[in-house]
Image (cartoon, rainbow, N blue to C red):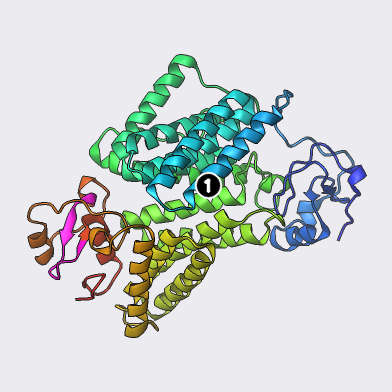
Amino acid sequence: MPDLLTPAATFESATSCLACSKNGCKLLLCSRCRNAWFCSRKCQVVARKELGHRGANCRPCDRAPPSTAPSQPSTPIDAAKLRRYANLNDEAHTALMANTRIGNLAAVKKFREAAAVADLIGGADGAYLRAHALQALSSQLSCLGDNAAAASAACSSLREARASGNRTTLVCALSCCGEAAKKAPSEMASAERESREQERRSGSSSYGGLDLSQEGRVSLPTTPSALARLRLAYNEAAVALCDEALAAAGGRGSPAANDGWRVPDLQAKAQARGYLGDCLHGMGEERQRSLELLRQAVVLWRQVLRTATPGHSTKDAQQMLADQLSSLGFLLKAGGFQETAEAEACLREALALSEGLEDVWLTGKILRYLVSLGDEQYTAVGPAEAEAFRSRLKQCLVQMGREPETNCLICLEPLAPPADGAAEDAASGGGSGGASGPSDSCVRVMPCNHQFHLGCLSTWRRTTSNYVCPLCKQ
């Protein structure tokens, strides 16, 4: 194995460690190829074994490595504004820990202020920071039910991501748009049209770096069927952008494969694949591809945690891993013996992660899936354990300030007043399909008088072998 040059011999063009993607300019240079950087010998071993940095991918080179970082503006960032931005983000995430509507409203205010501060910073750095603040803002607005504002924030994030010239940020913005289109496809399409019209009038902004003005573009829907698939289009674009960027950089073993600038980093890749897998599953399409994407996302999130920089918080990555494990488990639970066993293992691992993070909402979601495992033929979840999971699920709802009788125990969201004839439709087996639409929020009453959202109940029926009430099993 080649030696690593001392920090004094490193180059300012080094952008990130090939193995763990840690950023910095004081990285150690591979003495053989002089074209790959590492933060330690351990990372060099990982790159050699897992990324194929050896043989033809580690050829000697007599010249100094060319700069791999796109040109950046030389204007220094205002340190005071940067600290203000970081403080606002910290305050927003602290408010979210309360798991209450008041906390969400406070977080929305902080994220809006953070986006305004990023706008004052300006340049590529300001666009990068503003894009991430707008993504967080869109997510919280969607949770609060303000779908039009969430769609507008997501489109603004997409526009800022293109201006930043950073593909990682662009992939995250596309995933954010996909999530906004999940609840409100018509509002998302309107916001996208308005955003493109604004770009046409004022011209697309670019602050150096990569020209991303035409990357990740989706076709605007012109028919109701295309509108229903808008979420899928955004998520497909995010995954395609990851794969195309990696291929253009020379493959997984190339020094540029993990630079985080030209090629999206591990977190963006994991998020894009997980969201696309969830989207395909929610639409009832391509089950095998959905399984493959969710498994890839789980592997990538585990790699993110394994290569995390010591001292840096991994809470977000752990939450995403638990969420993807729960989605994978839910999709697997209606399979045969092997798939049901894998589903149970995924859900138990996800439950341990969510309880360690004290994430009440995610814990409730996973408990709901574990309760449903008691219905399947091949499972180790017996009636007594399923009842214990059911009791803990009700406790989670109470902790979130929600009464079990007034919330859908599939999505954990409040129930709207039942539609006329809902009980009769449910009793007769009506209400099928899984395409997202206005009817998804309608309430269906089971013969046992337990109420659920129509869309939630339709998805539940597609992934279970027994058509029973998700709560009482009747």
Q: Is residue 4 left or right of residue 323?
A: right
Q: Looking at the picture, does residue 21 appear above or below residue 359?
A: above
Q: Residue at x 28, y 61 (%)?
A: 403
Question: Looking at the picture, how far across and down is residue 260, in whole percent?
Answer: 65, 43
Q: Secondary structure at mark 1?
A: helix
Question: Looking at the picture, how far across and down is residue 248, in whole percent?
Answer: 62, 41
Q: Is residue 199 left or right of residue 283?
A: right
Residue 241 can be seen in this image = no
* Closest to the observer, 464 or 217: 464
Question: What amino acid is labelled 1 in the image?
Answer: His
Q: Residue at x 61, y 29 (%)?
A: 126
| Residue 272 forms part of the magenta stretch | no
Q: Residues within 10 Å of mark 1 (few under 14, many from 20)?
A: some
* Closest to the observer, 5 or 92: 92
Which residues lie in the magenta part?
A: 441-451
Q: Residue at x 56, y 25 (%)?
A: 119
Residue 405 can be seen in this image = yes
* Closest to the observer, 276 or 470: 470
